[in-house]
Image (cartoon, rainbow, N blue to C red):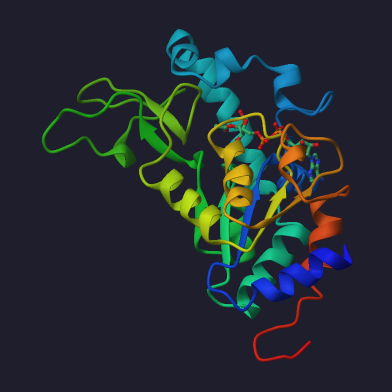
Amino acid sequence: MQEVITHLRAATSHPGGVAVLTGAGMSAESGIPTFRDALTGLWARFDPAQLASEEGYRESPQRGWDWYAERRAGVRAALPNAGHLALADFDRRHPGVLRLVTQNVDDLHQRAGVADTIRLHGDILVDRWLERCRERPACDIAAAAPGRPPHCTRCGNLVRPGVVWFGESLPGGAMEAASEAARRCRVMLVVGTSGAVWPAAGLAGQARRHGATVVIVNPHPSEIDAEAHHVLRGTAAEVLPALLGVVPGGGEKS
Ligand code: OAD
């Protein structure tokens, strides 16, 4: 831990010096389930082919809509945990140093106060049309008729959640921005991800190849532990305040 704090201190004098990649474990202590934890993960109980693919949604739009409605309610009811707050506090004390990249579709980093987050897998609270709208002017999604899912009364298009499903491209520019953050940083913290989903999982290796110190924060082994110089076995809400809380703010000498 002490060695990591020393690296973090040095990185705070560089713009973009600290990159953080977060996954579902980041929000676990806020009560939002992860995907791949053995008993509690969503993919232990639900089939991703049905619930995280366009084919699955088309097969049963109501099943998909209802599942996401329940997850949206869980996200709205959740609060940022001590880990989210530690990152936001670090960002406030070191303007321009933090580049935060998340795979999470919740808004807990934003609600904690990090406005400038690169969101690789979209936003569960946003609605999108299932088909690209071809009408001119384009149909207004805010005017969709209520239903499970809501639909367009003009063209019949269905509403879907704004998350990235398996087989879909990431939001325009997000991976490029994340790669740039990985190449520029001096320290990359990888928090609460299994490292099973690409291209996000490749960011740790990219940072390492460009000279960064890579630190994994996870209570359990991940698929990318080999990329790390340091593995801190603990949870996001325990480790991040301990790690970031002691890095002095701008202007302070250490
Ligand atoms: P996973 O569910 O695959 O992995 C969660 C990781 O968090 C595991 O390695 C756990 O050990 C760790 N973990 C659990 N509790 C923790 C805690 N309190 N603090 C820190 N770590 C903890 O989630 P992701 O790696 O985020 O895709 O999954 C990647 C993508 O797969 C997700 O973004 C999602 C999913 O399909 C989309 O939504 C598009």
Q: Is residue 57 left or right of residue 41?
A: left
For the N terminus, which image quadrant? bottom right
Image quadrant of residue 13?
Answer: bottom right
Extreme residue toward the left, this view: 136
Image quadrant of residue 37?
Answer: top right
User: Where is residue 29 shown, x and y percent of the image?
Assistant: 80, 48
Q: Residue at x 81, y 44 (%)?
A: 218
For the C terminus, which image quadrant? bottom right
Tell how many labels.
0
Q: Is residue 71 left or right of residue 121?
A: right
User: Where is residue 56 shown, x and y percent of the image?
Assistant: 50, 13
User: Where is residue 97 shown, x and y percent of the image?
Assistant: 58, 71
Q: Residue at x 51, y 23 (%)?
A: 166
- Using the image, determine if residue 86 lies above or below residue 163: below
Nearer to me, 22 or 232: 232
Nearer to me, 229 or 96: 229
Q: Residue at x 67, y 40 (%)?
A: 74
Ligand 1 location (quadrant): top right
Image quadrant of residue 250?
Answer: bottom right
- Using the image, determine if residue 12 lies above or below residue 70: below
Nearer to me, 142 or 13: 13
User: Where is residue 234 shown, x and y percent of the image?
Assistant: 88, 49
